[in-house]
Image: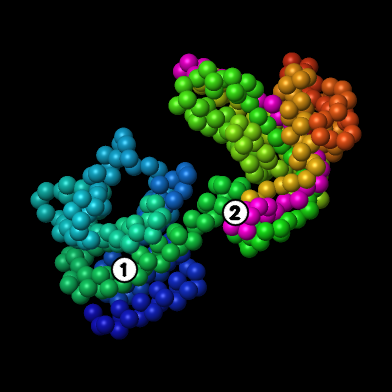
Amino acid sequence: MPDSRTSDILIWLAREGLAGRVGYDLLAGFCQRARAAGVPLMRAILFVDTLHPLIEGSGVRWARDPTEDSLTFDYGASDSGEALASWQRSPFHALEVSGAETLRLTLGGPEPSRFPMVARFEAEGATDYLAFLHRAGSDGLAGLDGLYSHWVSDAPAGFADAHLDFLAATVPTLALLFRMATLAEIPRTLAETYLGRDAGARVLSGRIARGVADRITTALWFSDLRGFTTITDRSDPAETIPFLNDYAEAAIGAVQAAGGDVLKLIGDGILAIFGTGADVAAAARAALAAERDFRLRLAAVNAARSARGAATTTAYVGLHVGEAYFGNIGAPDRLDFTVVGPAVNEVSRIASLCRSVDRDLLVSAALADSLAPDIRAALVSTGRFALRGVGRAQDLFTLDPEIAEDPARSAHLAEALAR
């Protein structure tokens, strides 16, 4: 194979990397050019572990002929159970254990391959299999110490020496580009996970200077758990984190499902916002919809925890609408992207008042007045209260208790909130 083909594809990879082509498009383009250069590729795969709270890693696969396999895929943890067993039966695990960087298998013999993945390709007519473990130096990023790939041929003679030389010369650059694309996704994942979706996007867009903040009108949510201190004092300390995680997952899931953004986890407390634009009615409706969804999720959490004898509780939620500043606060080298202002203090005080009036939900007059009339009609007054640290007394509302006992009214409210 002429060296010019190798040079050409390396130049193409450099250009594609600079242009930002990633994932399947990059692998497919590489495979098509490799085949044009004479490499008899039948299949290829490229994947890498990454830093993500929900998945262990992701990858892309290419096939010369259409298959039912997806072009891109994610995979979960492989450190236990069948996932671990499957990984240990793979040629990539064999590379890890041996310390080698390549593994070549000649296929088509009387006995099927000892690797189930390779045996499947062999059954499809594959004659040659080449796997790479593209190791990388340690850069302090968990799960990004290497990248895996394999290359499969069904040509009668498999890969010739020239084909192997071509792949050895070009695949490391392809792997580097794929790894760099994965690295580029990590800041987005971390920003969204630790700051929230909207706040994370703002930080990544460049809003990182201290004091940079937008004045917004938003619906605010503050919640905390009923009896949290008492429950944790009486429980095994090892149960505290699972306890918080179960209830936080219910609250965060409900907020995000309604389009909200969770900004703060403060022990058992959660601060969230809905909307940062002019449509206050939509933001208020979303906040109330999230609270209703939260109650359903709480019921499921409590049922599951009760079944295994674990402690259960419920939550207080305060909802409010008001102006706040949304941006960077803190020291130059330690910033927090959050909301501040009187409205934030008020929603916290409203949630705290739930205990005194024995209500799971309290809604400010500002939020109640922002709702459409048919939704507003589902709220009833709990009285007028002076909030600690807030200069003026205000009316607070809660959901009419009779709605839960009236299927028709419950269905009507659910329909109105879903609009």
Q: Tell me if 363 is positioned left or right of 171 in this view.
A: right
Q: Residue placed at 42% from the left, 49% from the top? A: 74
**Residue carrying label 2:** 334
Q: Tell me if 253 is positioned left or right of 97 in this view.
A: right
Marks 2/1: CA–CA distance: 40 Å
Q: Is residue 284 above or below residue 18?
A: above
Residue 314 within the magenta-colored segment of the rendering: yes
Q: Nearer the viewer, residue 243 or 59?
A: 243
- The mark lying in front, picked from 2 and 1, is 2
Q: Main secondary structure of the magenta part?
A: strand
Q: Residue placed at 63% from the left, 21% from the top? A: 227
Within 10 Å of disc 2 (Cα), the crowding (few <14, some 14-19, many 20+) is: few
Q: Is residue 35 above or below residue 340?
A: below
SS at badge 1: helix
What is the three-letter code of the residue carrying label 1? Val
- Report the magenta residues as a range: 306-335
Q: Is residue 53 above or below residue 362?
A: below
Q: Quadrant of residue 162?
A: bottom left
Q: Is residue 21 above or below residue 334?
A: below
Q: Nearer the viewer, residue 338 or 403?
A: 338
